[in-house]
Image (cartoon, rainbow, N blue to C red):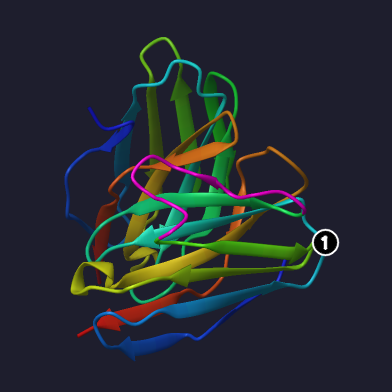
Amino acid sequence: SAVISQKPSRDICQRGTSLTIQCQVDSQVTMMFWYRQQPGQSLTLIATANQGSEATYESGFVIDKFPISRPNLTFSTLTVSNMSPEDSSIYLCSVEHRGTNTGELFFGEGSRLTVL
Amino acid sequence: QKEVEQNSGPLSVPEGAIASLNCTYSDRGSQSFFWYRQYSGKSPELIMSIYSNGDKEDGRFTAQLNKASQYVSLLIRDSQPSDSATYLCAAFNDYKLSFGAGTTVTVRA
């Protein structure tokens, strides 16, 4: 099983600022996924990050708001830009278990952001 | 219409009873299906996967899939207080995993 480390685990941010979340995996993976879980809600996929190419964003999410980097096969970052209270959520990094395109995901512990 | 819908909770069952969780999905192209368990304040963890019609058993957990009815279920037998959590149903298609809203289960001692 993959070990996924996320930083920060939690943060309190001011409106209008930006925060970058880091995700480090202990093995090389092709795809990394970023999810958002708003309070009391389920998980929504923000984007899929492949190494060496631009991230693929889901409907309702745009690169200007959630820029993603994927510099190598073990690391990715998600930036939440120009934050508003509506961005208060848990942001989760995930990778696939047992190879590519299986649908079986491991999740990091999440980054809980509160925007004031 | 949501891609994955789960029966509304919360679900409260006595210790030792069977907890039954249901899920339907809208995308007929979905290839595989999963149940994740999420304890309060924690991230989801995969507990069951099912790819073909029928039942799949793993310990006290049984997943059932009916692709014709676009229906997935999870049975938890001999429920324990440690099973108290939110259970998320997920359907996978075309590199995307879509989650239901979750059903919160409380096992009463």
Tell me: residue A86, above or below residue B102: below
As drawn, which residue projects farthest toward the top? B68
Whether residue A55 is in magenta: the answer is yes
Quarter holding residue A36: bottom left
Residue matched to label 1: A28
Point out residue A93 in the picture as x, y percentages from the top left corner: 55, 64
Inspect this view and state whether residue B99 appears. Answer: yes
The residue lying toward the viewer, choosing from A73 and B99, is A73
Tell me: residue B100, above or below residue B93: below
State the residue at coordinates (26%, 32%): B2
Whether residue A13 is in magenta: the answer is no
* Relative horizontal placement of residue A108, taking residue A116 as reference (left or right): right
* Chain identity of mark 1: A
The residue stretch that appears in magenta: A52-64
Q: Amino acid at mark 1?
A: Gln
The residue lying toward the viewer, choosing from A23 and B51, is A23
